[in-house]
Every structure is written in C-alpha cells, then in structure tokens.
C-alpha cells in the first residue's frame, strides 16, 4: 500500500470559507486517498507471474523453439509437411493415453495402468472380432464397456477404499498385463487377418493427403479427444469439480462436491479413453500386438509432465499434455534426422522431464 | 547391503546343496529362466523343457523376466534356483554380461548352467550354450537378399531394424551376419553401426515388436525414401516395417528379411510380406538342455560344444518361397509344420 505524492500547495484562504486555521497544517501533508498498487516486478518475476496465469505457455514456447532448432539442424526434410504429419501420427497413441492420464493427474492422482488397459482392450476387440467371429462393432462396443469398467475399478479402489492411486494402478497394471498375455496367448494377430475378418478395427489407420501431409484418422481422433476434454474441463461444472478436487479435496467436499463420485467418474472416463485409444492403436500399428506399448504408461506421464500439468493436482491445461506429447515426438524425429544415436534421444527426453518439473516448482512459488 | 544378501544366499546355496544330496536320489531339480513368458518363442521353449523334464522324471521350475532386458528378476531367479539346490539351470540371459556374476555363483555351487538362445559374454561364463547360430541365421538372409537382387545389390539402399540400444549379442550377431552375407565389410563384428558402406542408409531400434518396427521404418524412410532392402531383428518388427512401407505405397519394391520362424512370420513369408526368414528351433534347444542336465546329474558329464564354435548349434533353416541357387531353403508350406508359436 502506498500513497500518492502530495499535490502542489494550495493558494491561501480566499474568503471565510477556506480551511480553518487548525487545518492549514495539513497543506504540507499528502492529501490523496490510500489505494493499492501492483508492486514493481523484476522482469523475471513478471515472467513467473505470466506463466502462473497461463501454464500452457511453457510447452508452447518449448514446442515452437524445438521445431525451429531441429528445423535448422535437420533442414528441409524435418520441415516437410509429410514429416510434420508423420510426427503427429507417431505421437497419436501416446497422446490419447496422455489425455486420459491428464484427467487423473488433475485430481492429484497417477495412473500406471493406462497402457495396460489399452493393450488389453485391443486384444479383446481383436480376439472377439477375428478369432471368435463376433461382428466388429459389437467387439468394439465390448472393449469400450470393459475399458470403462477397468477404469472404474481403479476409481472405486481410490475413492472408496482410500488406497493411494499409485499403488492401486501399480497393481492393476500388473493385473491387466497378465490378463492380456493370458487372453492373447502372447500372440500377435496379423495385419492381413484383420483386413480379411474385421477391417473396421483398422479404421483409424486410414489417411488422406493434404498439401503433401499424410493425415491419419488416428491423428484427428487425438486432436478431437483433446478438444472435447478441454471443453468439458473448462466449460462445465463437472470439469471445474475435477480441478477443485485436485486442488484441495477437503475444501471441494465442504463446498458440496461429491468428490468420491467424481473421482470414480474420472477414472472410468480415463478407462473409456484408453479403450478408444486401443481402437486407434490397431490402426496405427497395423496388427494387434500384445507386446507393444509396454512403456506407454511412463510415456504418457512424460507427456503430461512436459506439458506443464502439475503432478500435485488442480493446475495445468489438458492442452499442455498434447503439446508435451508433440515435444517428445519433435525431439525424437529431429534427433533421428540429425543422425543422433538412440541413447542420446533417451538422454534428451530425461532432461526435458526434469526441466519441466523444475519450472513447475518455480511457478508454484509465485508471489501474489 | 546387496553384498550381505549375496553372502547369505551363497550360504543358503551351500546349505541347500548339502541338504539336497539325500533328496537327489528321488528327484533331480532343474530351472528354466526365460527372458519373458510373453514371447511365443519362450512359450515354446517352456513346452519343450516341460515335456522333456516329465519324460526324464526331473522336477522343473520355470521363471521369467517381465520384459526383454529385465536383469533384476533373472538374477533373483538364479538365486532362487541356487537356494533350491537344483542340478542344472537353463537360462536365456536378458543381458549377456550383467548376469555373469549370478551364473558364476551358481556354477561355484556345483550347478550345470546352460545358456539357451542367447550366449553369455564371454560364452564360457556358462557351462555350455545351446543356441541358434544367430550369425549364420543372419548370413543366410543376407546371402539370399544379395542373390535375389543380383546386379542391383551393388546399388542397394539398406535399412537395419535392430533390437534396442544395449546391442546384446543376439542383436549384433544377426545384424552383422546379415551384412556379412550381403557382402558388406562389418568392421568390428560386435558393433552395429560402425560400417562405412555407402549402401547402408541407417539403423533404428524396434524393441522387437510391431509398433517399434513401424516407427523405426518410418523414421528411416524419412532419412532416405529409396530404401529397398530391410533387415529386421525378428518377424513382429518385420510386420511393423511392412505396415510403414504399405502406408507409403512402397511395399512391393522392398525386400524384407527377418529371423525367427514363428508361425505368424512363416505365414507372412507365404503372403509375400517377408521375403525370407531364418527359422530357429526353441523346442529343440530346451529339450536338449534338459537331457544334458539329466546326463550331468547321472554321472557328471558336461555337454560338449560343436566343433569350431563356442556353443552347441541347435540348427537354423532358411524359409522362403523364392529360393535361389546355392542356398538351401525350405518353402513356407514345409515351414508351417515346423514353426513355433
């Protein structure tokens, strides 16, 4: 709180209606009304404040910078519409998993089972449609229902049994992985067999060409999922409840939010998104492979963290996870085209994660 | 702390071996430790071991890592087997070097350790190695690819889709075998990527699955869209590579070669997805391993290696429907009766 500087001294009393004698002493003192004023910030604190207000800004800047840098290093090949659309295509499955992961992380949870649910559901729909001859739409419907149920199982254990999300999903990760191996017999279902029996399963592998870019339906699906979730999280009461629970569960409960119910719904929705991801993954990989995406859970968490969504819950935009996934994709493509060995790609992603979390911690320390 | 545990386990092992002596008369114990229990290759191996063990009256315990490269679980499995006082261990090491201390410990406890499929480094870490000649497997597909291309082999554009960044023995043996068969100077035969032959476009890793195969193929096609020969570490990676090529409409202009002989892979040879693959025989590896353990338990004979090799060769056969002169091969039809998984 500060005060304005004193106004210039007034001329002396003109008539009897001027200030009384005892008031003349005030003439020299400040006359303004007390008011608030934003403190003068250093440029760095200004940035900190800006990032606190718009947390998606960091991943957007990093994405833009990395595209620029890799464009300079790897040259035209990197910048070609085809390569950029290829990056989009390559990150689409991890991106969809990251969308599901973001929902959980926003409630201050974590889900280690996302990829296991996804692979299990791709095996379920494949086995039903190809080995058992169930019509493809029914097989997909069954996988959606089971995926939602699998997510709900996680949610019930977190919300009702009050078990830590990390432990619950560490358990179900193993459980779903084992079920996947049992149900698939650890055998891939070949691309040609899918084409013959149930081409609908590969729907999201279809693509069209625009100005040299090759856009798959799976890439579009990923963007649509993010757009829908962004709307739900920011423009509906339910979405605000998700943020409120992640920020302070007790306070949310006191405000009248039925936190347990919302939590179960969040986990179930994540399971449903994983099942949609399973459909997209069949299109992307071509075959149904019980051994793919083994580290998908960690890759989805990587995308979420790099995207600036706080692991402590309640802060960050879901769009950040999309940018996070794209940043990883741009790094991998750029380093590959620049001829960098695989292990240095892993090295770079590792630093990205740590830097992203360090920035998040710094932003959290923002002063009002 | 680890040291204490190790010491305690060695003690336990010694005690186990001691107390197991009277029991050994009724039942010989054996362990099978595979890289994973997910890959049909190891499933077949377990079938072979289980059947042979039942026939010989051997009690078999099976263990597996969670994923390829899971060293910790394999070390724990070796330690459990030592503690159980078994006569022999069959193991497919997830890491050719990292498992050496555990294996040395087992041999010190008087256990016959046989490496299956993947040799240790050095190979004499284990008492014996029963394996596919992976280098030979690579040579066969390399020679086949060069002979199929004919004169065009001199201007081939080659991509190699390998396993992972660790470059374990099976990974470089197949890769370098392929290069040797194709007629490329491999420089250091234990190192992928040190070649300077201009025909090589590059290599990428696949983790041996379809998703990795597709992504790696896409990446290499970005480096050079004219690639026309693709070596793959195994058939799932080959299936993924084919999807990437098909998405770019180039599947008919590219030769894909692979190694394994899994049934989906053989069907892919029949349909022209894979040009040729080198088939290996996991069931035979495991059953021969169990027989060796039975012989060792009976009178202490240790298995001998094949002449000129530091391992016992369990055989490799080229599978292709486009045979070339001078390279013996079988057709995909014949291979379907022999394939695993």
Image (tube, grey):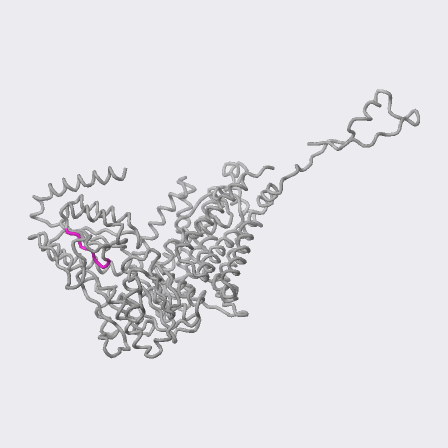
Residue B33 visible to an observer of this rendering? yes
**Which quadrant of the rendered structure holds the N terminus of chain A?**
top right
Residue A287, image x, y percentages:
37, 65
Q: In this view, does B97 lie to the left or right of B106?
A: right
Q: Is residue B305 left or right of residue A360?
A: left
In the picture shown, does residue A248 fall above or below B267?
Answer: above
Residue B241, image x, y percentages:
38, 67
Q: Does the magenta stretch include residue B114?
A: yes
In the image, A296 versus A146, the foreground residue is A296
Residue B181, image x, y percentages:
28, 70
In the picture shown, does residue A43 fall above or below B216?
Answer: above
Q: Give the range drawn in magenta.
A: B112-118
In the picture shown, does residue A344 fall above or below A107?
Answer: below
| Residue in view at x 6 percent, y 53 percent | B299
Q: Is residue B166 magenta?
A: no
In the image, B315 versus A213, the foreground residue is B315
Q: Is residue A179 left or right of residue A86?
A: left
Residue A191, image x, y percentages:
36, 68
In the image, A19 versus A225, the foreground residue is A19
| Residue in view at x 46 percent, y 48 percent | A353
| Residue in view at x 41 percent, y 59 percent | A278
Q: Is residue B126 left or right of residue B202?
A: left
């Amino acid at each position: 709180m500060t005060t304005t500087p004193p106004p210039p001294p007034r001329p002396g009393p003109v008539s009897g209606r001027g200030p009384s004698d005892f008031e003349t002493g005030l003439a020299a003192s400040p006359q303004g009304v007390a008011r608030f004023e934003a403190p003068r910030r250093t440029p760095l604190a200004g940035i900190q404040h800006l990032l606190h207000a718009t947390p998606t800004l960091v991943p957007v800047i990093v994405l833009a910078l990395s595209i620029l840098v890799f464009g300079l290093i790897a040259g035209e090949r990197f910048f070609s519409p085809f390569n950029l659309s290829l990056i989009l295509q390559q990150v689409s499955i991890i991106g969809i998993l990251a969308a599901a992961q973001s929902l959980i992380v926003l409630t201050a949870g974590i889900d280690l089972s996302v990829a296991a649910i996804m692979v299990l559901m791709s095996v379920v729909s494949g086995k039903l449609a190809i080995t058992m001859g169930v019509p493809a739409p029914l097989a997909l419907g069954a996988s959606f229902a089971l995926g939602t149920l699998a997510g709900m199982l996680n949610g019930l254990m977190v919300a009702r049994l009050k078990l830590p999300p990390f432990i619950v999903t560490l358990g179900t990760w193993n459980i779903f992985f084992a079920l996947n191996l049992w149900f698939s017999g650890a055998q891939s279902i070949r691309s040609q067999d899918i084409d013959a029996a149930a081409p609908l399963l590969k729907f999201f592998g279809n693509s069209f060409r625009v100005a040299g870019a090759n856009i798959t339906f799976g890439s579009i699906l990923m963007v649509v999922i993010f757009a829908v979730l962004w709307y739900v999280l920011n423009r509906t009461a339910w979405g605000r409840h998700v943020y409120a629970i992640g920020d302070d569960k007790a306070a949310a409960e006191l405000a009248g939010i039925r936190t347990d119910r919302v939590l179960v719904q969040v986990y179930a929705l994540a399971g449903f998104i994983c099942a949609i991801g399973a459909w997209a993954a069949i299109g992307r990989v071509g075959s149904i492979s019980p051994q793919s995406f083994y580290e998908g859970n960690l890759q989805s968490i990587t995308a979420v963290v790099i995207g600036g969504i706080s692991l402590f819950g309640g802060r960050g935009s879901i769009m950040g996870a999309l940018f996070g996934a794209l940043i990883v994709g741009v790094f991998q493509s750029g380093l590959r085209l620049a001829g960098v060995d695989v292990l240095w790609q892993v090295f770079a992603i590792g630093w990205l994660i740590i830097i992203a979390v360090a920035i998040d911690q710094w932003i959290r320390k923002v002063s009002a | 702390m680890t040291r204490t545990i190790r010491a305690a386990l060695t003690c336990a092992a010694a005690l186990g071996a001691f107390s197991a002596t009277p029991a050994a008369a009724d039942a010989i114990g054996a362990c099978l430790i595979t890289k994973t229990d997910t890959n049909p290759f190891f499933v077949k191996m377990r079938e072979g071991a289980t059947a042979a063990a039942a026939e010989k009256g051997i009690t078999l315990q099976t263990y597996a890592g969670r994923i390829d490269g899971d060293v910790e679980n394999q070390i724990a499995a070796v330690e459990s087997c030592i503690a159980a006082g078994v006569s022999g261990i069959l193991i497919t090491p997830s890491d050719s070097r990292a498992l050496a201390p555990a294996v040395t410990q087992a041999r010190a406890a008087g256990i016959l350790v046989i490496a299956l499929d993947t040799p240790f480094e050095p190979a004499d870490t284990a008492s014996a190695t029963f394996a596919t000649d992976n280098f030979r497997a690579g040579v066969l597909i390399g020679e086949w690819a060069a002979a199929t291309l004919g004169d065009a082999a001199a201007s081939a554009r080659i991509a190699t889709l390998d396993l992972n960044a660790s470059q374990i023995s099976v990974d470089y043996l197949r890769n370098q075998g392929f290069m040797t068969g194709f007629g490329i100077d491999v420089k250091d035969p234990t190192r992928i990527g040190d070649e300077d032959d201009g025909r090589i476009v590059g290599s990428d890793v696949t983790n041996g699955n379809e998703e990795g195969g597709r992504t790696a193929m896409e990446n290499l096609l970005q480096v050079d869209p004219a690639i026309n020969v693709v070596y793959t570490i195994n058939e799932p990676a080959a299936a993924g590579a084919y999807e990437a090529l098909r998405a770019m409409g180039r599947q008919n202009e590219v030769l894909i070669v692979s190694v394994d002989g899994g049934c989906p892979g053989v069907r892919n040879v029949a349909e022209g997805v894979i040009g040729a693959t080198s088939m290996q025989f996991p069931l035979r590896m495991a059953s021969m391993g169990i027989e060796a353990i039975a012989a060792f338990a009976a009178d202490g004979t240790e298995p001998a290696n094949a002449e000129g090799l530091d391992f016992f060769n369990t055989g490799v056969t080229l599978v292709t429907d486009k045979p070339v002169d001078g390279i013996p091969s079988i057709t995909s039809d014949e291979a379907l009766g022999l394939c695993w998984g």
